[in-house]
Amino acid sequence: MDNKSNNRIFGMKFASVYPLYVQKAERKNRTKEEVDRIICWLTGYNQSGLQQQIEHGNDFETFFAQAPMLNPGSSLIKGVVCGVRVEEIEDPLMQKIRYLDKLIDELAKGKAIEKILRS
């Protein structure tokens, strides 16, 4: 992926993508609460911190830069998103974004929440 594509993705507002994550989950009979739990697990945000990020309209770059702590278990996230293996993505921010995409994909595919959270 080139820098132009990365910059476009990094500049996307998390608040504009968040409802798409929820819709994807709900189409597969999963819940907004499960989406929030996954996001909080990955980023270290609590529910109010996540809500603040959405309300402030921060982009992905800011969203991850302000995240309290990337979960150490995130290194266990493996697989393909958008045709790219997440564990091989070199750009740290793009890797975090794709980790989140991968976790939401797993939720939508019916995977148990405990397995999604690598516990």
Image: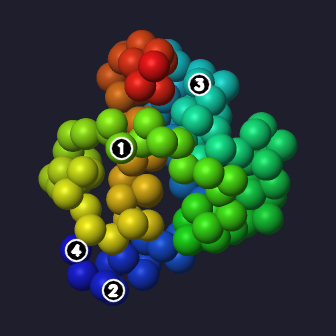
In the image, what residue type sits under mark 4?
Met
Q: Pointers 1 and 3 in contact (CB under 8 A)? A: no
| Label 3, residues with CA under 10 Å away: few <14, some 14-19, many ≥20 | some
Look at the picture and state if 108 lies above or below 70.
Answer: above
Q: CA distance from mark 4 to mark 1?
A: 21 Å
Query: In 3D space, how far apart are the residues under numbered discs 2 and 4 (Cα atoms)?
Result: 8 Å
Is there CB contact under 8 Å for labels 2 and 3?
A: no
Label 4 crowd (10 A; few <14 / some 14-19 / many >=20): few
Q: Position of residue 30 (x, y in %)?
A: 52, 19
In the rendered image, which residue does mark 4 sit on? 1
Q: Earlier in the sequence, mark 1 or mark 3?
A: 3
Q: Tally the marks.
A: 4
**Which is nearer the N-term, disc 4 or disc 1?**
4
If you read the primary sequence from the N terminus, does the residue marked by circle 2 or circle 1 appear first?
2
Mark 1: secondary structure: helix
Q: Amino acid at mark 1?
A: Ser
* Residue displayed at 63% across by 62% down: 63
Disc 4 or disc 1, which is closer to the eye? 1
Q: Is residue 116 visible?
A: no
According to the image, label 3 marks what residue? 34
CA distance separating discs 2 and 1: 26 Å
What percent of the width, then of the height, locates residue 37? 62, 30
Residue where numbered disc 1 is placed? 75
Dot 3: element: helix
Relative image position of residue 96 (x, y in whole percent): 43, 56
The label nearer to you, 1 versus 3, is 1
Quadrant of the drawing holding the N terminus: bottom left
- Farthest residue, direction front: 72
Type of residue at label 3?
Glu
Q: Which residue is mark 2?
A: 4
